[in-house]
Image: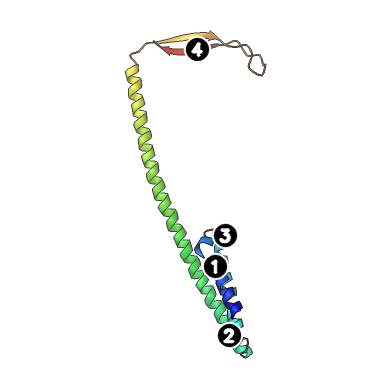
Amino acid sequence: MKKTLSIALAAATLAGCSSTKNSDMLSLIPLALAGAGGYIGYNETKDENRDKQLLVTGAAAAGSYALGKYVEGAIKNDMVSEFNAGYSLGTSNAAKTQYWIIQKRQEEDDYWSRESAASYRYYSFPGSEYDPAGVKLAPHDVIVRGIE
């Protein structure tokens, strides 16, 4: 009986919510519960005749499998609802971020439209003949715009 309780406890621990958020492990829940249920049914009917032992073992395994499928479905539904909640929060945050980006762009446009009255002057400098790696470059000028 002590062995049976420890098997049941191990199966319940393995089927806990925190250990099943990994979607790869979800499909193992019904199988683990069916194996544990079948083992418990077999152990509890050791002293019974063979037909009764097979019937109880099969029924316990089938019932445990059905329970595992129910738990698996509940966990999948929970994962989908968590994903949907996160998605809606994310889209809400994206809309707010986009709003503030637009506001900043309009402020920048206002700034540059006010600054358009300023005069600009272009300064020309001869470009270097070689790049840092020592490769010779084509002759060119570097032009810098300055606000006066």
Q: Earlier in the sequence, mark 1 or mark 4?
A: 1
Q: Residues within 10 Å of mark 2 (few under 14, many from 20)?
A: some
Q: Tell which circle, 2 or 3, labels the residue nearer the N-terminal end.
A: 3
Label 3 element class: helix
Calculate the distance from the C-alpha at mark 1 to the C-alpha at mark 4.
71 Å
Residue on which the image places disc 1: 13
Judge left or right: residue 41 versus residue 91. Answer: right
Q: Residue at x 36, y 20 (%)?
A: 112
SS at mark 4 in the image: strand
Q: Which residue is mark 2?
A: 55
Disc 2 to disc 4, C-alpha distance? 91 Å
Inter-mark Cα distance, 2 to 3? 32 Å
Q: Earlier in the sequence, mark 2 or mark 4?
A: 2
Whichever of labels 3 and 4 marks the residue nearer the N terminus, that label is 3
Residue 116 falls in which quadrant of the image? Answer: top left
Query: Which of pointers 1 and 3 indicates the residue nearer the eye?
Result: 1
Q: Which colour style is shown?
A: rainbow
Q: Amino acid at mark 3?
A: Asp
Q: Are marks 1 and 4 in contact (CB under 8 Å)?
A: no
Q: Earlier in the sequence, mark 2 or mark 1?
A: 1
Q: Name which quarter of the figure residue 111 lies in.
A: top left
* Residue at image location 50% in from the left, 12% down from the top: 143
Q: Which mark identifies residue 143? A: 4
Amino acid type at circle 4 is: Ile
Q: How many marks?
A: 4
- Reading the image, the residue beneath label 3 is 24
Residue drawn at 50 percent across, 8 percent down: 124
User: Which residue sits furthest bottom?
Assistant: 49
- Marks 2 and 1, how far apart at CA: 27 Å
The location of residue 133, given as percent across then percent down, is: 66, 19
Do the numbered discs 3 and 4 sit on residues whose CB atoms are within 8 Å?
A: no
